[in-house]
Amino acid sequence: MDDFRDISARFKKSHDADNDASQPQVVDHAESFRIRAKMIGVLLLDARVKAGRSLDDCATILRTSPEQIQRWEFGEEAPSLPQLELLAFYLDVPVSHFWGVDTLEATADDYVSAQDEFLSLRDRMIGALLRIAREEAEISLEALSEESGVSVEQINSYEMGEVAVPIHELTVISNALKKNISYFLESGSHLGDRLAMREEWKHFTNLPPEIRRFAANPLNIGFLEIAIMFSQMPADKLRRIGESVLNISL
């Protein structure tokens, strides 16, 4: 993407010169439009290739011709904002991608590196949680090995975060430690929040229809807040409230 970096640098230089009030000059609007169209074209091509879509695929979505898509990618013409919005949805990128300066190809290496760091960190975190759970349960490595069928050396490697724990072994070890597998789930990041939200949505969709409708109605927020407060009250206080309500109704 060296050509794109050159185009981006030229556009930035032109933009800075346009904003320099101390050096008044005639702005070449035609050149500015041409550079912008080239940048959008490169970003469009980048997003299409990354998504594994063909010119025909994109043309079908926009009800236009493959040649038109290609003219946009070459920077000969530029799409409208609604057309970019449809393309952004279809190619699974934010629409702001098309007025940025970073290609998906250029950021792919950083993304892979971040994935590697995440996996390594999570392995260490799971290992630490495993060790904490074992020590809280006052179970030795030998006893856990006998209970789970996983060797002492392997469990020790897991606890040190040196080796990723296969999920089937983690499930057996969790059961031996009287822990639910959710004990080890990621919960302190955006990814953890998204995973937790999906689990909550799964439970919500499994509720009886009348409860789902009640919870989804904004007019019932007050009732839900009251229910939350009741759920957090000590049992003896709830009992007193129940007795008071019963006395009132008699």
Image: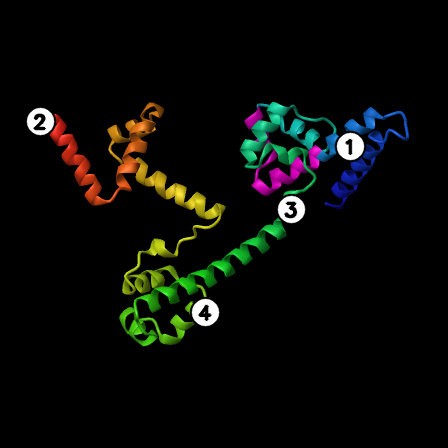
- Location of mark 2 (residue): 250
Residue range highlighted in magenta: 40-62
**The disc label shown at residue 105, or none:** 3
Q: Which of the 4 quarters of the picture holds residue 213?
A: top left
Discs 1/4, front? 4
Q: Is residue 101 above or below residue 139?
A: above
- Location of mark 4 (residue): 160
Q: Which of the 4 quarters of the picture holds residue 234?
A: top left
The mark nearer the N terminus, 1 or 2, is 1
What residue sits 54% from the left and 54% below the top? 115
> Neighbour class for label 3 at 10 Å: few (<14), some, many (≥20)?
some
Q: State yes or no: residue 96 in magenta.
A: no
- Residue in front for this viewpoint, 161 or 78: 161
Discs 1/2, front? 2
Task: Give amino acid for label 2.
Answer: Leu
The mark nearer the N terminus, 4 or 3, is 3
**The disc label shown at residue 35, or none:** 1
Task: Give amino acid for label 1.
Answer: Ile
Discs 4/3, front? 4
For label 3, the SS is helix
Residue 207, image x, y percentages: 26, 35
What residue sits 40% from the left and 53% below the top? 185
> Neighbour class for label 4 at 10 Å: few (<14), some, many (≥20)?
some
Q: State yes or no: residue 42 in magenta.
A: yes
| Main SS, magenta residues | helix
Residue 189, image x, y percentages: 48, 48
